[in-house]
Amino acid sequence: MKVITDKIEINTRGNADIIDITTKVQDIVTRSGIKEGNVLVFAVGSTAGITTIEYEPGLLKDLPELFEKLIPSNRSYHHDKTWGDGNGYSHLRASMLGASLQIPFSKGHLLLGTWQQIVYIDFDNRARQRKIIVQIIGE
């Protein structure tokens, strides 16, 4: 059993910016030399999340619209009163989506569906430089 930890750094626009990181994760798995195992992808920070979607124009509009309906950005949250940064909705959306995702791989290739990509969603209310931890476990 071998464990390798690496990272991805990206710049985001915030406001439900959805970034396809599939190729970056696959590149890390390939460089690791590990052929069979699992890769954990973890969003560092409390206003972003990781999931899979079909990365296509319709869903890139639908997903932010869904989060806006569920957790509107135009209302006040208790967090906003605590810190005055106006991003309480960002924290709630990120906690609902989740900070990590585990993907199996075999023969050095991620076992994703044909139309399934790994995406990072930055819910914060401003552009940010973000870090994503990628940890590979396998042999």
Image (cartoon, rainbow, N blue to C red):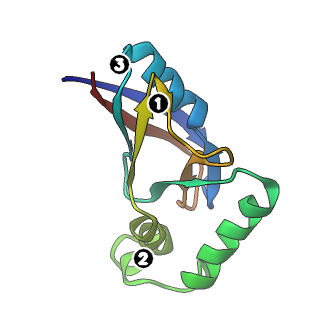
Residue at the spot x=44%, y=14% of the render?
Answer: 31
Q: Amino acid at mark 1?
A: Ile
Counting from the top left corner in percent of width and height, residue 52 is at: 55, 53
**Quadrant where the image shows the N terminus:** top left
Q: Amino acid at mark 2?
A: Asp
- The residue lying toward the viewer, choosing from 73 and 26, is 26
30 above or below 112? Answer: above
Mark nearer the N terminus (3 vs 1) = 1
Give SS at disc 1.
Answer: strand
51 above or below 29? Answer: below
Q: Would you name the residue on which mark 3 appears?
A: 34
Q: Is residue 67 left or right of residue 31?
A: right
Q: Would you name the residue on which mark 2 appears?
A: 80
Distance between mark 2 and mark 1 Cα atoms: 29 Å
**Disc marking residue 8:** 1
Mark nearer the N terminus (2 vs 1) = 1
Nearest-to-viewer mark from 3 and 2: 3
